[in-house]
Amino acid sequence: MIKELVTDEAALSTPCEPATADDAQIVEDLVETLGSIEDAALIAANQIGQAKAIIAFIDEDETTCVMLNPKIKRALYPAKQEEQCLTKEGTSKVTRFARVQVTYDELVDGALVPRKRDCADWIAVLVQHGIDHCKGKYV
């Protein structure tokens, strides 16, 4: 179901709980909500009112990817930049890495399956922004 975006700073600044296999509906809602927003590339569960560590993003192949419990394990080539967010006015100055290795869970047939992904450039930036949301960093 397409959900309304949350803009409440207190809600977005609260660290998210780990996601479980029982969060399939949140995953579905995230994917549908992301697909409904023109030019959006990333959304986190707390942006639709669910304090779970889940992000969804559009990758370089225009495929929607979902990561549950994402964590950065390695980061290379930091740079300062400005970013925008779906749920915050204006831009924020942040340091982002051009390459990151991320571990996460994927929901497959009702179970969480551990995965690892190397991300570069734009996708690396998206994933870092999403992980910041999961940590309650209001960037």
Image: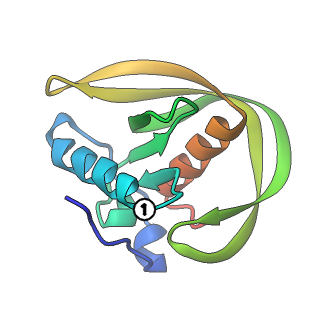
Q: Position of residue 132 (x, y in %)?
A: 56, 53
Q: At 40% across and 73% down in the image, what residue appears?
A: 11
Using the rendered view, name the quadrant where residue 111 is placed.
top left
Q: At 73% across and 35% down in the image, what residue appears?
A: 121
Tell me: residue 14, above or below residue 100.
Answer: below
Mark 1 neighbour class, 10 Å CA radius: few under 14, some 14 to 19, many 20 or more: few
Image quarter (top left, top right, bottom left or bottom right) of the C terminus: bottom right
Tag count: 1
Give whichever of 6, 135 is nearer the camera.
6
92 left or right, relative to 106: right
Residue beneath label 1, please?
37
Mark 1 secondary-structure assignment: loop
Tell me: residue 49, above or below residue 71.
Answer: below
Image quarter (top left, top right, bottom left or bottom right) of the N terminus: bottom left
Using the rendered view, name the quadrant where residue 50 is placed.
bottom left
Give whichever of 115, 36 is nearer the camera.
36
Q: Position of residue 27 (x, y in %)?
A: 26, 45
134 left or right, relative to 36: right
58 left or right, relative to 46: right
Q: Position of residue 49 (x, y in %)?
A: 30, 67
Tell me: residue 75, above or below residue 51.
Answer: above
Residue flagged by tag 1: what amino acid is it?
Ile
Q: Position of residue 3 (x, y in %)?
A: 27, 66
Q: At 38% across and 47% down in the image, what residue appears?
A: 53
Q: At 71% across and 71% down in the image, what residue appears?
A: 91
